[in-house]
Amino acid sequence: MNAETVLALAAEQEDLKFVPPIPESLEDLGVPVSLVEQIILKLLYFRTEATGRELAIALGLNFSVIGPLLENMKRQHQVSVRVSLGMGDISASFTLSETGRQLAIQYIEANAYVGRVPVPLDQYTVGVKMQRHKPDWLTPDMLRAALKHMVISDETLSQLGPAVNAGKSFLIYGQPGNGKTFLAEGLFNVESEPVYIPFAIEFQGQIIQMYDPIYHQRLDEDEPAITAFHHEREFDGRWFKARRPFIMSGGELTLEMLDLSYNPASKVYDAPFQLKANNGIYLIDDFGRQKVTPGEVLNRWIVPMERRIDFLTFLTGGKAQVPFECFLVFSTNLRPQQLGDEAFLRRIQYKMFVRSPEAQEFITIFRRYCASKQIPCDEAALEAYLDKRYFRVKKIFRRCQARDVIDHAIDLIRFERREYKLTAEILDRAYDMTFVSDDYEE
């Protein structure tokens, strides 16, 4: 795939969907042929032997692409055919010659990467830009459907919607326990087109591992269907099809985690969170609680937020310019003024205060959670509980409190083999197990 050609097509046809085209030749890969050769030799070194079909699948390519290369490697006495089923090299079982084995050891010392042939950075950049959301992709109904599991007001939806639709930086702040993280996580439910992400990226001979099973939810089959002579693909096998990623970091986040991570054993780089989150959401939870100051964290994002690009550093000191197309969300329990001054906060485009629920809103949350746990609670028991524990003492409602108390009540019921229903007495005892007392003996 030629990056310039794809961009030109995208400019002509605004609604053109990005589907990584299947390479038809080694030239279409956009990476040096020597890199493909090295991966084949390393694969055979680790596997001892493999058929032409198995090599093609492991590389994410059609056999017709690597067939000529295997022929050349045979002529160079790097590989040999151990067994052939008489259907050509696709069914032949390849193994390393002594020359090939020595080369493989040499290449493994340089880097131990084996797997899908990496996608060049320029092709990846094209793919990311073509898969970003259109300016009007989100509707109120889509957002409401994504957050239907929450009790959320129209006012909150009207504040949240424009920020999510724009995909610009967003600060969610408010008291702990009011569902800021839960709200941000709910955005993962917004219905949207799947995206294509490469298994690995190549830039100036360096390899960056992209696929992360922890954060990437694949939608494609692990391997394509295989016919007698070739396997059919709907898109370039060097990419995988996935839901738009949602990645979250908390108080453990350091600035080093936002750059390339070098693995000294494999000599391959692992992509940082924001690169893995491209075309998706990256949530920095507990903003302000990291080991580094909020200013240091936010300064790291100034260029990416303003220019939609990021710069990553290799161990050699070289830098790679990569696209920054993730929806960056900050969530904090701190007051915004504790994070920084007005100029500091202005760099974050959207802000939303998540307030504590009113009594009726809290009751709705309580009853909905009871329904999800299929536990009955009569009106009198709930009224008595609210009167004693909230209204009389003027306790402020928090969205998490209903869940926490009900869960503890269920634990109590199960332990004491009680009838599966909430009573005023059970709720009262569950409350005491949930919240700390003001009484403390010296």
Image: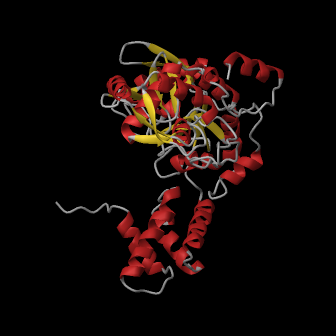
Q: Quadrant of the C terminus?
A: bottom left
Q: 220 or 348, which is in the foreground?
A: 220
- Residue 127 lies, with reference to residue 8, above or below; the image says below
Using the rendered image of the protein, determine whether residue 193 is visible from the camera's viewpoint.
yes
Which residue shows up at 35% across the image and 26% down it?
A: 267
What is the residue that sits farthest to the front in this orientation? 86
Residue 51 lies, in percent from the top left, at 51, 42
Looking at the image, which is closer to me, 35 or 296? 35
Count of all numbered marks drawn on residues in the image = 0
Question: Vertically, is 302 above or below 153?
Answer: above
Farthest residue toward the left? 442
Q: Residue furthest right?
A: 12
Location of residue 96 with respect to 408 vertically, above or below: above
Q: Is 163 placed left or right of 346 in the picture? A: right
Identify which residue is drawn at 30% across, 31% down.
265
Left or right position of 138 against 299:
right
Q: Is residue 352 left or right of residue 250?
A: right
**Quadrant position of the N terminus in the picture:** top right
Q: Is residue 271 visible?
A: no
Percent across and percent down for residue 113 are 41, 31
Residue 74: x %, y % from top left: 48, 27
Image quarter of residue 151:
bottom right
Q: To which quarter of the image does residue 27 belong? A: top right
